[in-house]
Image: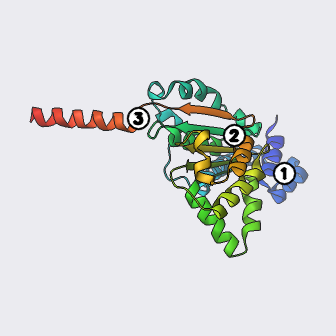
Amino acid sequence: MDKQQRIIDLCKDLRLPSIRKIVQNEALEQPAQAFEVLLQVLEQEKADRQVRAKQNRIRTANFPQKKLLEELRVEELPEQASQKLPHLKTLDFIEEGQNVILTGSSGTGKTHIAIGLGMEACLAGYRVFYATVPSLINQLKEHRSERTLRSFELKFGKYDVVILDELGYISFDKEGAELLFSHLSLRAGRKSTIITSNLPFTKWQDMFHDPVLTAALTDRLTHKSHVVNMIGPSYRMKETEAWIKMSGNKVAQN
């Protein structure tokens, strides 16, 4: 591809119709050096915009912390998580509108994996929304009271990935259960949702207080989804024990 055509294509990508028109109409009158400089400027602008777009997607996702999948010690993860992680990292589940449900013991890496997949999705160009389940329910109740729930529903349904963390840590009332059910139903079979929970599916009824609603929600969330069992010893506890041991050795040496 010659420089002129590359400049024209970049102008289209960057939405710079005036520059594109000048290049197309006055190409024969421009010195070669001018095109070389213009091409470098446009390529740098495109690269900078891509970086800013990635940073903006990560910022608006509202992650509590930035956790990367590369920071995980795969050998410390529960067996099923270490087996399924390579496939999840491809992000194919997003393209297929599939859910990822991480259930199991506290401290086994559920939140780290969920946020890590969300970070990967942001870098790949997907729009991501993160919230803990209690905070989401509070948001939904506020939107309902302010009569802005419909507007939030439209946004919620369009995110490529929604990450809902800590399902099961705090129970909620009937209104909260119904709001959560209706919003997750908006995404069922169309967009991906990642959920972390310390409770197995058999205990979800304790949160929703409604066996019919629980059964319907479980069915919709698990249909063609990646369910990862993360039962195992606490990764955080291992780190704490290692830190205590290391601190003890330092004291003994002094």
Residue 157 left/right relative to 107: right
Please tell me which residue lies in front, 72 or 147. 147
Q: Which residue is mark 3?
A: 235
Residue 228 percent location from the top left of the image: 59, 32
Residue at the extreme bottom of the image, as rendered: 146
Q: Which residue is mark 2?
A: 99
What type is the residue that disc 1 sits on? Val
Please give the label number shown on residue 93: none
Task: Tell which of 83 and 17 is nearer to you.
Answer: 83
Which of marks 3 and 2 precedes in the sequence? 2
- Could you tell me which secondary element the residue under label 3 belongs to? helix
Residue at x 73% of width, y 68% of height = 149
Amino acid type at image mark 2: Asn
Q: Three-letter amino acid code at disc 3?
A: Tyr
Q: Dot 3, how many residues are within 10 Å of its Cα: few (below 14), some (14-19), or many (20+)?
A: some
| Residue 227: % across, % down | 64, 33
Tag 1 near tag 2, CB within 8 Å: no
Q: CA distance from mark 1 to mark 3?
A: 58 Å
Residue at 80 percent across and 51 percent down: it is 11
Q: Which label belongs to residue 23?
A: 1
Q: Farthest residue toward the left?
A: 254
Judge left or right: residue 45 versus residue 66.
right
Binning the other alpha carbons within 10 Å of mark 2 as few (below 14), some (14 to 19) or many (20 upward) gives many
N-term-proximal mark, 1 vs 2: 1
